[in-house]
Image (spheres, rainbow, N blue to C red):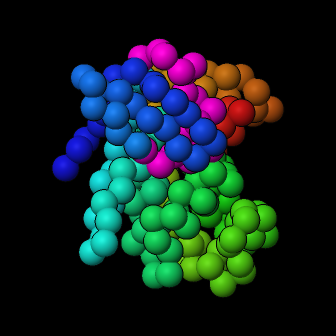
Amino acid sequence: MIEYLEGTLAAKEPMAAVIDVGGVAFAVSISLHTHDRLPAAGERVRLLTHLHVREDAMQLFGFADASERQIFRLLQGISGIGARMALNVLSGISPDDLRLRVSGGDVAALTRIPGIGKKTAERIIVELRDRFTKGLEGIDRAAAGGSLSVRDEALLALQALGYARPAAERALSTAAGSLDAPASTASELVKSALKLLNS
């Protein structure tokens, strides 16, 4: 499997990019989220990839970060959602916001994504809600046991969600400073930090 492509960005469109890797041009399907993070054509770029194989075709999908690729793969595991629809979801909502909406059971927010009806939105929530929230629930139980501070548990949770430690620490510091009172649970602090990371 192709883990990532690193080379020169030969061309880009809203939902596609061409990466020149040592003289070989790879066409990659991307989300609008990834498109917004691409450099100008002619510059160096590195995209994580997922190779989608069907009986009649092979297609490469590219992602700006591991979090987006992970969610893309999770979405594909849901009945009725293929690779194209998964990419459409990630073009209509950022990975961080999707986590928040799914964890909160926000069907209305998901149905605002083009091509996603109420039944599909409900299916996404049913399938992914536990995956997105179980880590936070486990964090709260560990914090209650007194083994780690709320901040340390929140940092571990953000890293488990795919965020680099420096970015996670900055978001947590800002989130902690913006709260009217100290966060009583790690999940409360993580939710505040996710909003900042998604802004």
Q: Which residue is drawn at 45% across and 65% down?
A: 83
Q: In which quarter of the image is residue 28?
A: top left
| Residue drawn at the location 55% of the way across and 67% of the way down | 85
Nearest the viewer among 62 and 183 is 62
The verdict on residue 133 being magenta is: no
Residue sticking out furthest to the left: 1
Of residues 7 and 140, which is closer to you in this image?
7
Residue at point 73% right, 65% down?
A: 114
Of the 4 image quadrants, the one containing the C terminus is: top right
187 relative to 74 in the view: left or right? right
Q: Which residue is drawn at 29% across and 36% down?
A: 4
Residue 1 percent across, percent down from the top left: 19, 50
Q: In this view, does 166 lie above or below 34?
A: above
Residue 112 place in picture, x, y as percent: 78, 64
Query: At which x and y percent is residue 34?
Result: 55, 38
Q: Is residue 10 above or below residue 114?
A: above
Front-lying residue, 85 or 195: 85
Q: How many marks overall?
A: 0
Residue 21 percent location from the top left of the image:
29, 27
Q: Would residue 182 be seen by someone viewing this image from the given angle?
A: no
In the image as oriented, which residue stretches furthest toward the top? 43
Image: 15 above or below 55? above
**Could you tell me if residue 118 is visible in this image?**
yes
Q: Is 140 situated left or right of 8 in this image?
A: right
| Left or right of 92, for residue 165 | left
Q: Give the range drawn in magenta.
A: 28-44
Residue 31 inside the magenta-drawn segment: yes
Question: Which residue is more in the foreground, 165 or 90?
Answer: 90
